[in-house]
Each structure stands twice: as structure tokens, then as C-alpha cells.
């Protein structure tokens, strides 16, 4: 039996609908960073520190119909990234984190969505 390896994704962003993303979106699960706590006799255990919020970073194909204002103002909605291997990831209560950057030569609009929780499905 063959296994489909994740190689494509489709980004559905609430009121923005399905975004025309280029290949290579990135998912970060966020969460805690664990570090060893050392004592005189060696490792005593670990400590935890919240390292960062989960995110989805994508490149949108830019065209005349691209609504940069709606994308820039996107807040408080869920985003789902569906992969060709059958896994889906929902970023809860997402918002656009950074200012948009348009690469004119390649027709690409970079967007970073942060959220409160990333739920694998």
C-alpha cells in the first residue's frame, strides 16, 4: 500500500475564502520549550516556558483581484490548511500578524497568520 506524503496544501481563510496560495506554506505548532534543569547529581528534570503562538505562513499569488485591505485587516476567524495527504490543521481565532509584503517580480504576497491554538484533524 502506498502512502501519500504531504506536498500540497489548500488554505481556507474564513471570510477571505480559499486563498490562491503558491506551493510551500509553513505550519508552526507553537507551544512550550523544555530545558533541562541541572543539579549537583545531574539532570533533575525539566522546566517549561511558553515559546510562541502557532502560525501558518503562506505565499498568495497576487493578481488584480487580490484584496490586500481585507487580507491586512483579517482578525478573529479560523483558518484551515487542508493537505493532499488527508491531514487538516485549523488555526483558531487567527489574525494577520505582520504587514503585508508584495514581491512585484514574482507576483507574490507574503502573509503570516497567528492564532490562539492549532488543532490537527
Image: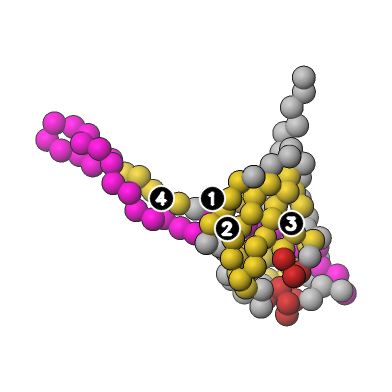
**Separation (CA) of disc 1 from disc 4:** 10 Å
Sequence-wise first label, 4 or 3: 3
Front residue of 34/121: it is 121
Q: Which residue is mark 4?
A: 32
Tell me: 107 left or right of 95. Answer: right
Asked if the residue under mark 4 is in contact with the one under mark 1, i.e. CB atoms within 8 Å, the reply is: no
Q: Quadrant of the N terminus?
A: top right
Front residue of 52/76: it is 76
Q: Residue 28: x and y, percent?
A: 56, 51
Report crowding for label 1: few under 14, some 14 to 19, many 20 or more residues within 10 A (C-alpha): some
Front residue of 117/64: it is 117
Task: Tally the numbered discs.
Answer: 4
32 inside magenta stretch: no
Residue 12 location, quadrant: bottom right
The residue range painted magenta reads 36-64
Q: Which residue is mark 2?
A: 55
Asked if the residue under mark 3 is in contact with the one under mark 2, i.e. CB atoms within 8 Å, the reply is: no
Sequence-wise first label, 1 or 2: 1
Depicted 55 relative to depicted 85: above or below? below
Q: Which residue is mark 1?
A: 29
At numbered mark 1, what does the secondary structure look like: helix, strand or loop?
A: loop
Front residue of 64/10: it is 10
Report crowding for label 3: few under 14, some 14 to 19, many 20 or more residues within 10 A (C-alpha): many
**Separation (CA) of disc 1 from disc 2:** 7 Å
Q: Which mark is residue 16?
A: none
At numbered mark 2, what does the secondary structure look like: helix, strand or loop?
A: strand
At numbered mark 4, what does the secondary structure look like: helix, strand or loop?
A: strand
Q: Which residue is mark 3?
A: 11
Q: Quadrant of the C terminus?
A: top right
Amino acid at each position: 500500500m502506498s502512502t501519500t506524503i504531504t506536498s500540497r496544501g489548500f488554505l481556507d481563510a474564513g471570510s477571505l475564502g480559499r486563498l490562491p496560495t503558491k506551493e510551500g506554506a509553513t505550519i508552526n505548532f507553537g507551544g512550550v520549550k523544555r530545558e533541562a534543569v541541572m543539579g549537583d547529581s545531574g539532570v533533575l528534570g525539566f522546566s517549561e516556558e511558553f515559546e510562541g503562538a502557532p502560525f501558518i505562513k503562506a505565499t498568495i499569488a497576487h493578481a488584480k483581484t487580490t484584496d490586500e485591505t481585507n487580507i491586512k485587516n483579517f482578525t478573529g476567524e479560523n483558518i484551515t490548511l487542508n493537505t493532499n495527504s488527508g491531514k487538516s490543521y485549523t488555526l483558531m481565532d487567527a489574525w494577520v500578524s505582520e504587514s503585508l509584503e508584495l514581491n512585484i517580480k514574482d507576483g507574490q504576497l507574503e502573509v503570516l497568520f497567528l492564532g490562539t491554538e492549532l488543532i490537527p484533524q
